[in-house]
Image (cartoon, helix red, strand yellow):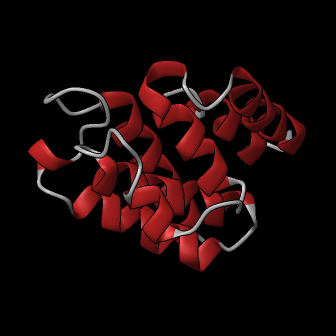
Amino acid sequence: YLLARPMAMSARGQPAVFSAAIDEITARGRFWFEQRPWHFAQYVAGRMEDAEFLAQPCRGFAPAMLAMAKALRADWMGDRSGAATAYATYLALPANRRAFYCPNRDPAAEALATWRARALAGP
């Protein structure tokens, strides 16, 4: 949710907003909010790979977070095909597995993934 609005702005031609959001999350430090935002930002920025991301201390929802992080990374890097595939992978998870921070799914993340998957699949 911390990167949903910045990604929307980036997709609409303001990539610096997304970069600034990554930097802001990184600056808050590793130990903020159970380390989840920091790991997410590091992965999206390309500073971390799958195994390290999945080994984070609070990893109960790491698979869903990794699916979304892969999508955001590919989207931000301009890999339309990779991003569309990654968003579809996230959306294909069972509803109870798409949560990031609680047992309930995140409608904002689902809306972002649905919007970006459709936009990237278009002409």
Image check: 85 left or right of 15? left
**Percent from the top left, x then y, of residue 3?**
60, 34
Image check: 17 left or right of 103? right
Residue occupying the point 29% across, 31% down: 106
**Percent from the top left, x then y, of residue 23?**
80, 34
Q: How many marks?
A: 0
> Is residue 118 in view?
no
Image check: 25 left or right of 1? right
Residue 24 to residue 48: above or below: above
Front-most of residues 75 and 60: 60
Residue 23 to residue 33: above or below: below
Front-most of residues 59 and 66: 59
**Percent from the top left, x then y, of residue 21?**
74, 30
Residue occupying the point 75% across, 68% down: 78
Residue occupying the point 29% across, 28% down: 101
**Percent from the top left, x then y, of residue 121?**
52, 70
Q: Quadrant of residue 100?
A: top left
Residue 79 to residue 37: above or below: below
Image check: 37 left or right of 94? right
Assign the C terminus to one quadrant of the image: bottom right
Residue occupying the point 24% across, 38% down: 99
> Is residue 29 in view?
yes
Q: Quadrant of residue 105?
A: top left
